[in-house]
Image: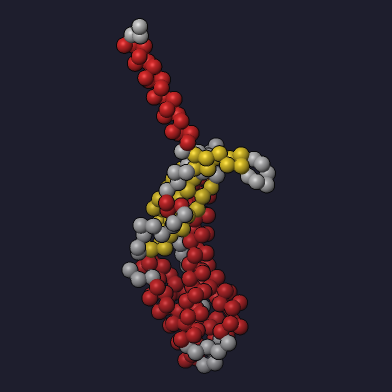
Amino acid sequence: MLSIKSVGLSLIVAGVLFSGCIASNSNNITTNETTGKKFVVDNNLPNWVDNVQVGIENGVAAVGQTSYSKYGNDVMLPEAMLKAKAELAATIQEKVYDFQRNAAEKANIDNIESYGKVFKSASKKIVDGVSLSGASRISRYQSPADGTLYVRVMISFEKLKKEIKREVKSNADVYKKMATTQQQANKLVNGVVEESESHWKN
């Protein structure tokens, strides 16, 4: 006959085994089809890792990640932040490119398609001048599966619009390449700023 003590011990052991099964099932072992190497996939990643704008209404966000380092946050956090800000810059640059095209159409610029390289060059130059020091870390997650660190950063619409306006104005000469008159060039510059204001509403 089992004693109360032995029954209790059995229940504890069963509970530990059961919880272990749950923990192991929370992640998947996946195999790389090319190398055949197995790796763990974290099935509990927060939704903002794939949907960067979730929960954010007044700013532009981006996510950066870095693999585990035995040196910890001193190495991982700066690297993840750097990658997040690089992603943020790329997102902003893509938007500025669209703003320029829209503004060019409204300014009646001829042969817009022929200025693709100019738009790309101008958008890069503008975003390179945008200070992302105002971008702050708003989310952080380190995967217990493989130690990967994820960080999400955001810059507010208000700060971003001020930066874009300043940089567009300071790079106004770029738009003279597309305009036939100074008035048209001014309209293009103002149009890019207006597109920014309209898109990034607070």
Q: Horizontal and vertical percent for residue 158?
A: 36, 68
Q: Horizontal and vertical percent for residue 97?
A: 52, 74
Identified at 40% across, 56% down, the residue is: 136
The residue lying toward the viewer, choosing from 91 and 76, is 91
In the image, is residue 137 above or below residue 18? below
Q: Residue furthest right?
A: 35
Identified at 43% across, 82% down, the residue is: 190
On the question of residue 162 being in view, the answer is no
Q: Residue furthest front?
A: 1
Q: Horizontal and vertical percent for residue 174?
A: 55, 81
Which image quarter is the C terminus in? Answer: bottom left
Q: How is the image coloured?
A: secondary structure
Identified at 61% across, 77% down, the residue is: 117
The residue lying toward the viewer, choosing from 150 and 170, is 150
On the question of residue 34 being in view, the answer is yes
- Which picture quadrant has residue 10? top left
Identified at 51% across, 50% down, the residue is: 65
- Which picture quadrant has residue 12? top left
The residue lying toward the viewer, choosing from 45 and 70, is 45
In the image, is residue 81 above or below residue 134? above
Viewed as shown, does residue 8 lie left or right of 72? left
Which image quarter is the N terminus in? Answer: top left
